[in-house]
Image (cartoon, rainbow, N blue to C red):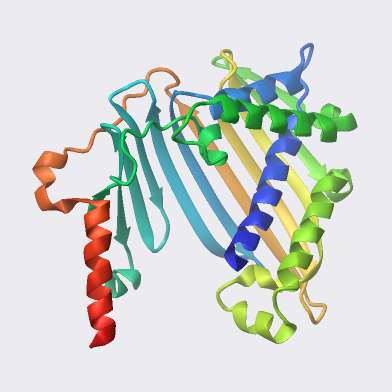
Amino acid sequence: MKKSKKRALISLILGGAVFCSAAVATLANSNGYGIYKNALKNLLMSRNHTMVIKAYDYFDGEKKNEVVTTEKVNLDGDAKLHRVENTDDMTYEEYFQDGHSITKHTWKGANSEKYEEDPYLIDDYISDQTPQTMASRFTGTAYYDDKTSEKFVRFMEIAADLVTGDLKNNFIYEGEQDNIHTYSITLDSFQIPEIISSGIDLITSLNNSSYDVEDLKERVEYNYTGYLYQDIVIDNLSAVVKVDDDGNIRDNNVTINVSGNDWDGNAHTWELHLDLSCCDYGTTQVDRLDTESLGDEVQKMSEYYKRTSVEETEEAID
């Protein structure tokens, strides 16, 4: 529950950044806001693309986390998805083929000594799964139809429209090169829509109400954002967006600077970065995992968890 609140705060800040960016686009002699908004919708509903997302942050000037995710999607092919997520302590890999998800965790650093190497696990709990779009994964409907996903996208589109206001004029058209159009924007704290600022205040209060101050002081050793205890504001937001002639996002780089005070009134800063790059729309070929050649390195998830559960129980008894 506590982790979900932290994720909610990060999601609100990043989500607010993305949709603030979408809400302020204006292109010389054309509807730039509509262009960027439609490009986001195209990506959310895309059935074939290659995407790389790099997310990282700094707290009080010190780099903390970095996650790099590479994803190849071809929802109309036999092999539909290959996704690799890399952090400092783990690599998570997922394939989707033959109606099943196949996943593997590879531990790094200290975690490689704490945890045994996992096999590739075939999710056999659900038969004949069918992965859908990015939007469907956001809404938790990844194995069903896209109707709910379309409703989600439409809802977010209306939400972006509602917070747009006069911010449409803050996006600068930088020009075109090789059929790629570049836009940039910088928003200061007083330009951030109040609904985003109010949401941050709400989630912070909810998180703080779960602990007393002494608990928070202990927890900040592994949850540094706990230092942002009060008076949290988005100081500024900047973004650079590149869209091709077909209306597809090619690059989207967002930087957000947040500040706040801890329980003693000491100031802290949090800098978040999100760099997204997309290519090969409509032409992506997804890598297929050769399960036959891997032999026992590939196991059914139900059997693996049943066996490990028994082993853990026996260890506890001993």
Residue 37 visible = yes
The spot of residue 183 in percent (x, y) is 69, 27
Image x and y of residue 189, in percent: 84, 50
Write down the quadrant of residue 304 in the picture: bottom left
Q: Is residue 101 left or right of residue 23?
A: left
Q: Residue at x 45, y 23 (%)?
A: 47
- Look at the picture and state if 29 lies above or below 317: above
Q: Is residue 24 visible?
A: no
Residue 7 vs 146, above or below: the answer is: below
Name the quadrant of the C terminus: bottom left
Q: Tag count in the figure?
A: 0
The residue positioned 66% from the left and 35% from the top of the image is: 240
| Residue 275 x, y percent position in the rendering | 56, 42
Q: Is residue 169 left or right of residue 272?
A: right
Q: Nearer the viewer, residue 93 or 36?
A: 93
Considering the image in quadrants, where does the N terminus appear?
A: bottom right
Q: Residue 186 occupies which quadrant of the picture?
A: top right
Residue visible at 32% across and 64% down in the picture: 108
Q: State the image coordinates of residue 31 (x, y, percent, origin top left).
A: 77, 16
Give the residue displayed 50% in from the left and 42% down from the top. Answer: 53
User: Image quadrant of residue 193?
Assistant: top right
- Residue 266 position (above or below residue 157): below
